[in-house]
């Protein structure tokens, strides 16, 4: 197996496991929030954490600490993955990137239009960004249930689509869900971001240096009124991806001497650590913490919603149909147009039925959808939005699995 393919499969496998854990945690939160322990659950989210140094005080509820601080690491990982994909991965090839970009664009625009059709001029009009994003971990977790019935090329396509999708969601959050801008704090944040870019330009390899600058950047982005998690994406674009030195050449003479072999292996391990770019090192460092801790914690604190007194209105209908219909229709339509216009090509061994199945799986919004809903709605509409997101995500997963299961060997046929 080629090294790049092995790395891709390891990444997809880890994302899939994280998605299964994410679903389990969300289910636990939903069950607790509708149990005799519901009040304790909601009280826990409102517990305040306080950090004070002299006259300086930072005070946040546990829910806001998770959503504003911990999720900044999730957004940092998203930014690192996006930069890597653009410079070295699927998005580097124009025609491969063309399909992912077209599919992601269709999967963002169509759900937003469907949502707006039900909520234009209403109290929930601001929620048009909720059904736009795909939860990559959750989606790949669903695909993992199908095993080898889903070709690797289709999983890679979904990953690239979701990464572009996440970029769109980040831009939507930064531009449309920002209020009460503090220009002074924003100017300081821009200056700190400049320092991060300078570190990257100087090829500084120390990860603690980037994380320290990132912490300062996060604080001033928080004060500026732009959502604090955007600092994670900005920091990612500053972390360099190039190697500082090449790996040492192979020495055939070492093969005959066991002691020389062991010495060479130790030398190669040290050289590999030195040769790996700061971006790759930071991505590998963050990934298990984000997948197995931060995202499940986010799901636990955000997926809980009490069914008692919950209402279903235009907000819920717009989100549900946006994710369940808008996503697959937009992805399939825009992908078809991109291929027919010669701007993109289908992944190897993948037909249109498989693209339709992936479109349904992409309707699993979850993490980013819940995140944007928290920015767009007040308490009553937020509960309505959560119910729609959870029900649409589960339905999209089931329908996506059904379509891809029936596709089976047909997924290996090109259209």
Image: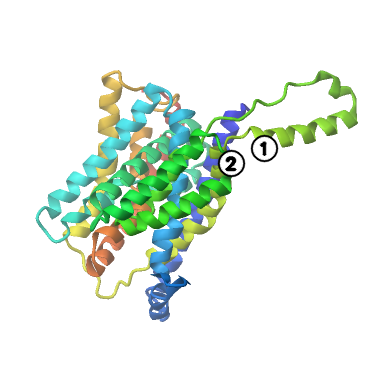
Residue 127 appears in which quarter of the rendering? bottom left
The residue sitting at the left extreme is 121
Which sits earlier in the primary sequence, circle 1 or circle 2?
1
Q: Residue at x 21, y 64 (%)?
A: 312
Q: Which residue is mark 2?
A: 281
- Quadrant of the image for the C terminus? top left
Q: Is residue 226 visible?
A: no
Nearer-the-camera pick, 347 or 53: 53
Label 1–label 2 contact, CB within 8 A: yes
Q: Residue at x 39, y 78 (%)?
A: 43
Q: Residue at x 30, y 18 (%)?
A: 342
**Rendering coords of residue 67 (x, y %):** 39, 61
Q: Is residue 165 above or below residue 392?
A: above
Q: Is residue 341 visible?
A: yes
Q: Indicate the secondary structure of the residue bearing disc 2.
A: helix
Q: CA distance from mark 1 to mark 2?
A: 8 Å
Residue 283 appears in which quarter of the rendering? top right
Q: Indicate the secondary structure of the residue bearing disc 1.
A: helix
Total number of numbered discs in the rendering: 2
**Rendering coords of residue 178 (x, y %):** 26, 54
Q: Is residue 357 above or below residue 260?
A: below
User: What colour scheme does the image use?
Assistant: rainbow
Q: Which residue is mark 1?
A: 273
**Rendering coords of residue 351 (x, y %):** 38, 27
Looking at the image, residue 310 sits to the left or right of residue 46; the answer is: left
- Quadrant of the image for the N terminus? top right
């Amino acid at each position: 197996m080629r090294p790049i393919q092995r790395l891709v499969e390891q990444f997809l496998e880890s994302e899939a496991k994280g998605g299964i854990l994410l679903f389990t945690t969300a289910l636990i939160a939903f069950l607790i929030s509708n149990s005799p322990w519901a009040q304790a659950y909601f009280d826990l989210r409102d517990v305040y954490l306080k950090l004070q140094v002299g006259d300086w005080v930072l005070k946040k509820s546990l829910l806001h600490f998770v959503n504003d601080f911990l999720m900044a690491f999730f957004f940092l990982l998203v930014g690192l993955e996006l930069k890597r994909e653009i410079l070295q991965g699927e998005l580097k090839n124009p025609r491969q990137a063309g399909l992912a970009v077209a599919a992601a664009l269709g999967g963002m625009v169509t759900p937003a239009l469907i949502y707006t059709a039900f909520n234009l001029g209403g109290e929930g009009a601001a929620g048009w960004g909720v059904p736009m994003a795909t939860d990559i971990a959750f989606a790949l977790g669903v695909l993992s249930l199908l095993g080898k019935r889903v070709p690797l090329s289709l999983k890679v396509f979904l990953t690239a689509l979701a990464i572009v999708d996440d970029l769109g969601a980040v831009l939507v959050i930064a531009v449309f869900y920002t209020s009460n801008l503090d220009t002074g704090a924003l100017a300081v944040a821009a200056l700190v971001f400049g320092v991060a870019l300078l570190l990257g330009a100087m090829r500084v390899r120390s990860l603690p240096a980037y994380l320290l600058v990132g912490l300062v950047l996060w604080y001033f982005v928080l004060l500026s009124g732009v959502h604090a998690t955007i600092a994670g994406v900005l920091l990612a674009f500053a972390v360099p991806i190039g190697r500082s030195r090449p790996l040492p050449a192979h020495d055939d003479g070492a093969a005959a001497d066991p002691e020389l072999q062991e010495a060479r292996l130790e030398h190669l391990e040290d050289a590999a650590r030195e040769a790996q770019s700061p971006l790759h090192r930071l991505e590998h460092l963050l990934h298990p913490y984000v997948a197995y801790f931060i995202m499940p914690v986010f799901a636990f604190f955000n997926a809980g919603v009490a069914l008692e007194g919950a209402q279903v209105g235009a907000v819920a209908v717009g989100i549900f149909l946006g994710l369940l219909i808008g996503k697959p229709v937009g992805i399939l339509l825009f992908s078809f147009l991109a291929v027919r216009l010669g701007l993109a090509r289908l992944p190897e061994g993948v037909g249109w039925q498989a693209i339709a199945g992936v479109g349904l799986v992409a309707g699993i919004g979850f993490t980013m959808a819940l995140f944007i809903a928290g920015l767009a709605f007040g308490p009553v509409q937020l509960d309505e939005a959560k119910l729609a997101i959870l029900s649409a995500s589960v339905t999209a997963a089931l329908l996506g699995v059904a379509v891809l299961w029936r596709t089976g060997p047909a997924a290996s046929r090109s259209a």
